[in-house]
Amino acid sequence: MTLEDVKNYLRDVSQNFNSRDSEPAKQCLAVLKQEAVAAGDQQAAKTIWCFEEIIEIQDKYIATFFQLKTEEFYDAWCTLERVEIELLSLTRHFQDVTNEFQISFIARQTSRYQSVFPYKLFMSPEIIKIEKTCSICKKVISIRNPCGHRVGEIYNGEMCSRIVTESELIGMSIVKDPMQKYSVPFILNSKGDGKKDYYNYSIIKYLIHRLESPFHEWDVTWTKNRHPHSRFSYVGRNDLCPCESGKKYKKCCLLEEGVLRPHCQFTFKVKPPDHLLTVEYID
Amino acid sequence: MTQEPTNETEYIVEESKETFSTWIDRPYIPNELKTQLFKANVLIVPREGFREHSEPVFPTGTEELLNFLRDNMDKGIVPDICSTDQDYREFALHDTWIIIGSFIVTSIVAPIIVDLISEYIKKRWTSKENHTNIKVELTVVEKDGHASRLLYEGSANDFNKSVKPTLKSLADKNVDTQPIVGTQPKKEISR
């Protein structure tokens, strides 16, 4: 495999996603990077790092799609988070302005997928970093005499980061918009030996059931619609209105043609089969 | 505890008693470091009394920011940090509010620092640029020793255009030490 073969493989992602094996491409890039580093060609090594990242991003984005298909929702969420983090690293060094490798598309869709997950609150650890080392030179970080390696830059085809080697956990917060999204709170199952996933994934199930490819574009809009009163027959006239206005049902939506509830509308670039173009009510 | 970021921008300008000297004379700054710190016209200063932590701490990313400022010394800035290697600690809160840090700067270099902070944010958070919220505290010390504290909490995109007019006012000596821009004081975020 040559570098041009790797590029072609990456360009064809929307065709090859179903039968993808990235190992030969990764091996090819590893050899090319070794040669670039040996020749002292930092620019070439950095370019190869970019292609390695593109493989990772594409692979993880595709993996997310299949995890959603098999209803491994939390795993899919974590994979999407990796995609987002790696996109952030890549876009400092590489702009896929023509969407040659679907990077702009993946960035757009990643954020859309995240928006239809039911996770709204996250645990957020608060730590004091006592000691850090440089991932490139392995030295302990000195604030007064820096090692010279800059976080996020590429050296010998590797991205520089900091490794926290000593830290202290000082607290845990509950946040709506965390820097990293892995820490989704779950409750313990009845045996107390594992998590119980009580989240309602109906919206994302609706979506993924209608997509045949991770590279079929879709978008979502959120509005409010009136849902038929027949769906709320269990609510008494004097109970609180299911629209969550805080008023009594009889003094709120019962006076209208339906109950005002959040409405999620998907737009698909590739039309799903007719029998799947349905409206579903989700509690 | 909960952190409740809002979309509201809060910008406060007030008089300050802090100067380069008051920071450099802190007990945790050893004598051998004081001479070097007095050469700086931009000092990154720590947060003191953070939670139950007795030692001063800096927000995560301070190392990267200081290195970025060091890379831009040709613009006339002399950056330094109020810490020894041994005492340097970073705190990380892991929500999307990015705490850039607290700075003591001379009025001459203050506009340069504001530009550099904006450039740093743009460079580091390229893909999140449009929805990055930041917190920055600048204490601007004039030649006569008068100091003003500018506390900005809001969109990274609006930081430069919010702060620059104040710096111009300070330079023109027309500063009003009352809050000149801002919203109703919001509840302090529990940290």
Image (tube, rainbow, N blue to C red):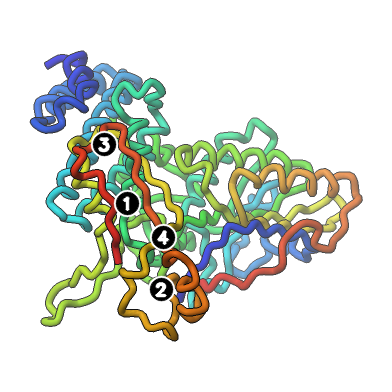
Relative height, residue A283 to residue B104 (above, below): below
Q: Quadrant of the C terminus of chain A?
A: bottom left
Mark 2 on the same chain as mark 1:
yes
Residue A262 image label: 4
Label 3 lies in what chain? A
Q: Which residue is mark 1?
A: A163
Q: Is residue B19 left or right of residue B134?
A: right
Q: Amino acid at mark 1?
A: Ile
Q: Could one spot residue B94 in this view of the protein?
A: no
Q: Amino acid at mark 3?
A: Ile
Point out the frontmost of discs 2 and 1. 2
Q: Earlier in the sequence, mark 2 or mark 1?
A: 1
Mark 2 on the same chain as mark 4:
yes
Q: Earlier in the sequence, mark 1 or mark 3?
A: 3
Residue A57 image label: 3
The reply to whether dot 1 and dot 3 touch (C-beta < 8 Å) is no
